[in-house]
Image: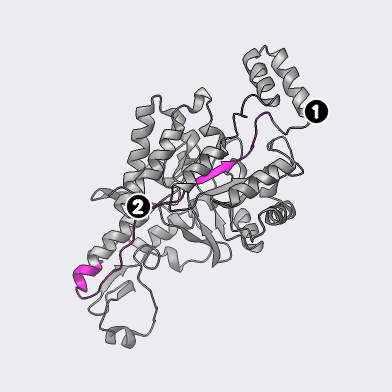
Amino acid sequence: MCTRILGVPVTFTTTIEDFIAHDSIKMSYTKQPLSNEVFIRSHELLFEQGLSDIDINVQDWDETKCFFATGEKSALPFDIFAASFYLLSRYEEYLPHVKDDYGRFTASESIAFKNNFLQQPVVDIWAYKLKAVLEEKFEDFKFTDRNYTVQPVIDVPRAYYFRKKGLLRTFGGVFNDLIRLRLGRLYQRAMVLSGFKRDPHDTFKWIINKQKNCDFKFIVLFLIGDYSTYDKNISINKKEFVSLIKSVADYSKVGLKASYFALDDIAILKKEKKAMESIINYELQASRHSFSKLNLPKSYRHLVELEIHQDFTMGYIKELGFRAGTCTPFLFYDLDYEVQTPLQIHSFHCLDSALLKYQSQLDKKEALQRIIKQVKQVNGTFTPIFHNYSFSDDALWNGYRELFTLILDSANED
């Protein structure tokens, strides 16, 4: 909170004399105040080993929510550090919960959804409230400012819809279209395969043009794992697919969309990492798991072991909002091992498919603007995830190019 959100370096001491002698900004985190400091009364959570089913009472606090209430002497009405740690560590995801059909933790199981603060970056809001308390107490201390930023992510589970599938899959698709009497798709397939029309999922020219007009880099994550029940991608033995990845890497940052089976098998993940690095010719930095599925802490331990430094899986597929309660990238803390890792979590706040529940383009735009406004109010980083196919001409994705452009333009607005 202090280092990443408020830009204040932190040192710790347990020596009371040193603490009292310090004449600049300081906080105590204990049961009783010590001297002329900002006192935060501590909850037991950060002093515990292991996990326990904690009884949490969420309360209203100004325009937001809080939990782990404290006494009157405390500078804040709750333990801001324990509450933030609970959300950032994803403590609740280690506890027993109901999963969806893919084994994912759902928004409806979260404390944020149940208490109506999922669409607020509460950790960042709390940090700014703490800043106000510190500024009032230590008037001479100058905080650094941070600016609102955008980190767009393009997820590519399948680069082409009709092309480069191989004879067997192509004939299978034609036969399926005939059986189901999908004559429009059969015609579209024929036009694409004969070279008269661009493949509907091949939106990369548009994506690169957008990138050229932006000062910040997109992160484009390609699925290159083996074909399976869950992953129906193009083979990396296809030279044109490899050439596509290389051309995108000339403009944007390229990362790995890990296959479904790589989630639990580190050997598969390692193989995919090496394959991607051989294509892009630099060390892989970013990844995201198929179907936005996470198995905590196992999934993240694999990334740490393979020295993949950034993850973009943390988020909800059907809800806009802040799964970890923040719009600031943070380091993964392994609750079982009680250790902070070097893996940086970039929690996404909007998945393109989550906007489909809004009927009209206006409703989609308003929902998107509401979440962007929340991030702007704390000068955070807005992380949306769109797929290459959501920029296609398919009626389902009508207006999504405009929505993506709206997000890019938000970085240049006051």
- Measured as percent of width and height from the top left, residue 268 is found at 73, 51
Depth check, front residue: 25 or 156: 156
Residue designated by label 2: 122
Q: Is residue 150 magenta?
A: yes
In this view, 121 is above or below 114: below
Marks 2 and 1, how far apart at CA: 51 Å
The answer to whether residue 313 is seen in the rendering is: no
- Measured as percent of width and height from the top left, residue 303 is found at 62, 58
- Measured as percent of width and height from the top left, residue 346 is found at 49, 54
Numbered label tally: 2
Residue at disc 2, secondary structure: helix
In this picture, residue 364 sits left or right of residue 22: right
Depth check, front residue: 174 or 98: 174
Q: Quick one: quadrant of the N terminus?
A: bottom left
In this view, 413 is above or below 317: below
Residue designated by label 1: 168
The answer to whether residue 92 is seen in the rendering is: yes
Chain part drawn in magenta: 134-162
Depth check, front residue: 299 or 216: 216
Prevalent SS, magenta region: loop
In this picture, residue 195 sits left or right of residue 296: right
Which three-letter amino acid code belongs to the residue tagged 2? Val
Tell me what residue is drawn at x 57 percent, y 61 percent: 309
In this view, 131 is above or below 348: below
Which three-letter amino acid code belongs to the residue tagged 1? Leu
